[in-house]
Image: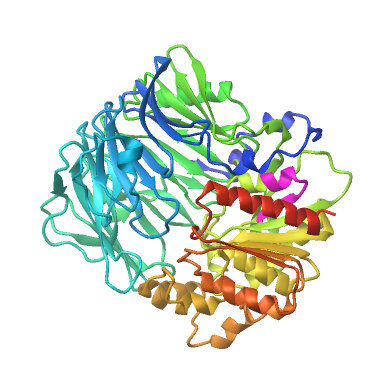
């Protein structure tokens, strides 16, 4: 399947872009409409399609895990409820049994997950893995069996044989790093709690990822060690492990095993024409197919395969270009997708058909667009009927949200930079205040066309929101990613300034009212933007931001592994020992005295990715000359806002700060 960029552009938005632009005649939507915990989420269809599990928010904030009959959605059973913990994952084990993961939002460290299993009627609840949350008896009932795995275990996946088993892994540590060194897979029966080793005998060291075949056998072990990415393969449970790829993780062509198709063919993400594509890999010949299975012009392959575990075949491929889509190989599913798209024009509609997809009784549809947050439906093919289950953010009126689109602009050195732009819904009388919103990472993809709460919140306040995928970002080809190596504070910053200047030339942005904001790396880029381009960026908002590159290598509180410090980070960021002067040049801490613009800083007291020492040192330095710095620490937060009360407080502060310092 080969897709051209032009065939994908605006695949979903033709209908939505024909609507008129609405004037904002009422008050701005409240912060809660964007950032409170979702009202509906984790909607999962059972393997047969007979039932759908859904997480609902009660009026008092309690989370209810409900199960509905797809033949009669008025038939509802509550399988579980919980208040202080947050649901992290939900999956059907079989048509009768569910497994779910809870996370304690007050704590931020490895192993902070509790795993449970429960029948769909709420009976036979079993606490499988005890993380750090200690309120299971009170919140989930008294019928929980008390034999639990310890917090060094984690849920990986369900099995696909109809049993009550799931796949879990046990972590091991090296007594140096905060993060685990390896994980080992086991089958766990969710009723008897019997644990069965899935990999017996000699095996590779330091495995941190496994790929299982359609029979739930561990067939590929993936190792990341000393800057090398190694993939080991075995043909069966008793066969030896042999490496099928051993490469420099960044400098050599990509080779990332993703899934088996049930016919002993491995599908991998591999390099192709300066980007990555999806290939079939012949395990007998140890070679890639001559042509890619899926290739998208202008984009790396970012997606997953939809497998039919009973027929042992690929049904389709979910992927993201500028927006998300699905290419179905199966004619039944393609027909269902076409009918759903006709019922829900103007949105990207992802379909989940469970395991039995050859003639599904019902499917779950997740619809989203640039203006519409995730909205959930059950579709029954027999009668072409679509029934709504609710929206994650029911307080959002799509008609009052901003138009979002995708562009590629030329940076000053000619490199093309992808940019998402969200324009306010209200008609403009002229250029408006603008925000350059920088994604974290930075060696990740920032987002896609679909709903983005942060961008839409800012647009609802009248700001043009610019989200560049600056050099260093992944998802748009290797040249863009490679161009960002060791460019923190340098050409990566140029891309942000060039994006702002481009928006000024387009007539969207007022050159005297442009701000910059972001989290993690985006927080770093915000501070360096204020340092390097004071003529352009009038204000800054950073949260969980890196304030000194050197501290990333030296802070003992950091969760970066020793291996990452020695290899990955030196390739991508730089070498603090060989060239310390280069770090000083692009350190916000060293340049703090140059920042005179209003600045809002927010950090988590438990952050181990960017320890609070970053924030404290920078705040002390910048405040010596700049009296327009607002600083807040959230003691219970880590690297990002997990608690609803934090998100609401933070974005209310952002709203007020920008209104006072940028909007006018």
Q: Is the image coloured rainbow, by chain, by secondary structure, or in one colour? A: rainbow
Can residue 198 be seen by looking at this rendering?
A: yes
Q: How many discs mark residues in the rendered view?
A: 0
Let me know if residue 463 is in the magenta part.
yes
* In the depicted structure, whether residue 538 falls above or below residue 617: above
Side (left or right) of 406 relative to 87: right
Let me know if residue 22 is in the magenta part.
no
Q: Which residues are magenta?
A: 457-467
Residue 314 in picture, x, y percent from top left: 34, 36
Side (left or right) of 264 relative to 87: left
Q: Nearer the viewer, residue 403 or 659?
A: 659
Residue 600 in picture, x, y percent from top left: 68, 63
Residue 285 in picture, x, y percent from top left: 24, 54
Residue shown at 73%/78% (left/top)?
Answer: 594
Q: Residue reaching furthest top? A: 383
Can residue 258 be seen by looking at this rendering?
A: no
Side (left or right) of 6 relative to 267: right
Q: Nearer the viewer, residue 377 or 487?
A: 377
Residue shown at 51%/77% (left/top)?
Answer: 551
Residue shown at 24%/34% (left/top)?
Answer: 143
* In the depicted structure, whether residue 476 falls above or below residue 620: above
* In the depicted structure, whether residue 474 falls above or below residue 1: below
Residue 470 in picture, x, y percent from top left: 62, 61
Q: To which quarter of the image does residue 333 belong? A: top left
Q: To which quarter of the image does residue 490 belong? A: bottom right
Q: Nearer the viewer, residue 142 or 73?
A: 142
């Amino acid at each position: 399947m080969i897709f051209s960029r032009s065939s994908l552009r605006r695949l979903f938005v033709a209908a939505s872009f024909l609507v008129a632009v609405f004037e904002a005649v009422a008050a701005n939507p409240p912060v809660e409409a964007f950032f409170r915990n979702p009202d509906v989420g984790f909607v999962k269809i059972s393997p047969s399609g007979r039932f759908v599990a859904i997480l609902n928010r009660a009026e008092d904030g309690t989370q209810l895990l409900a199960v509905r009959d797809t033949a009669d959605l008025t038939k509802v059973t509550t399988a579980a409820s919980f208040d202080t913990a947050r649901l992290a994952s939900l999956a059907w084990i079989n048509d009768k049994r569910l497994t779910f993961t809870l996370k304690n939002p007050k704590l931020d460290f490895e192993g902070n997950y509790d795993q449970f299993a429960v029948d769909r009627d709420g009976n036979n609840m079993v606490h499988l893995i005890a993380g750090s949350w200690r309120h299971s008896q009170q919140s989930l009932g008294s019928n929980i069996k008390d034999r639990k795995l310890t917090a060094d275990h984690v849920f990986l996946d369900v099995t696909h044989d109809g049993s009550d088993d799931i796949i879990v892994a046990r972590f091991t540590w090296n007594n140096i790093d905060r993060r685990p060194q390896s994980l080992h897979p086991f089958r766990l029966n969710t009723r008897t709690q019997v644990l069965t080793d899935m990999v017996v005998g000699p095996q590779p060291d330091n495995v941190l990822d496994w790929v299982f075949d359609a029979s739930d056998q561990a067939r590929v072990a993936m190792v990341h060690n000393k800057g090398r990415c190694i993939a080991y393969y075995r043909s069966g449970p008793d066969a030896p492990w042999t490496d099928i790829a051993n490469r420099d993780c960044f400098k050599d062509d990509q080779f990332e095993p993703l899934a088996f198709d049930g016919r002993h063919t491995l599908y991998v993400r591999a390099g192709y024409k300066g980007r990555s594509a999806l290939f079939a890999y012949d395990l007998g010949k140890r070679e890639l197919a001559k042509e890619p299975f899926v290739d998208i012009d202008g984009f790396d392959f970012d997606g997953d395969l939809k497998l039919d575990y009973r027929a042992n075949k690929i049904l389709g491929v979910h992927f993201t270009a500028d927006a998300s889509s699905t290419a179905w190989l199966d004619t039944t599913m393609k027909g269902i997708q076409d009918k759903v798209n006709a019922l829900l024009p103007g949105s990207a509609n992802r379909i989940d058909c469970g395991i039995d997809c050859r003639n599904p009784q019902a499917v779950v549809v997740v619809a989203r667009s640039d203006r519409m947050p995730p909205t959930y439906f059950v579709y029954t093919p027999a009668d072409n009927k679509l029934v709504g289950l609710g929206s994650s953010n029911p307080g959002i009126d799509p008609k009052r949200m901003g138009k979002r689109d995708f562009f590629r602009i030329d940076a000053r050195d000619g490199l093309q930079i992808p940019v998402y732009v969200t324009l306010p819904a209200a008609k403009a009388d002229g250029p408006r205040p603008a925000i350059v919103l920088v994604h974290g990472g930075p060696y990740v993809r920032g987002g896609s066309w679909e709903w983005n709460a942060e961008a839409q919140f800012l647009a609802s306040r009248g700001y043009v929101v610019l989200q560049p995928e600056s050099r260093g970002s992944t998802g748009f080809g290797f040249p863009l990613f490679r161009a960002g190596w060791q460019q923190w504070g340098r050409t990566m910053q140029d891309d942000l300034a060039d994006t702002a200047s481009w928006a000024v030339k387009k007539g969207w942005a007022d050159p005297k009212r442009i701000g910059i904001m972001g989290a993690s790396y985006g927080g770093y880029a915000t501070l360096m933007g204020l340092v390097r381009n004071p003529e352009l960026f009038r204000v800054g908002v950073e949260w969980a931001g890196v304030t000194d590159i050197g501290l990333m290598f030296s802070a003992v509180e950091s969760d970066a592994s020793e291996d990452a410090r020695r290899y990955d980070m030196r390739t991508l960021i730089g070498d603090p020992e060989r060239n310390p002067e280069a770090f000083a040049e692009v350190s916000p801490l060293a340049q703090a005295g140059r920042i005179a613009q209003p600045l809002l800083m927010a950090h988590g007291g438990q952050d181990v990715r960017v320890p609070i020492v970053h924030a404290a040192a920078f705040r002390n330095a910048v405040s010596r000359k700049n009296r327009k710095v607002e600083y807040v620490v959230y003691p219970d937060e880590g690297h990002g806002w997990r608690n609803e009360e934090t998100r609401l407080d933070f974005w209310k502060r952002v709203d007020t700060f920008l209104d006072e310092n940028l909007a006018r």
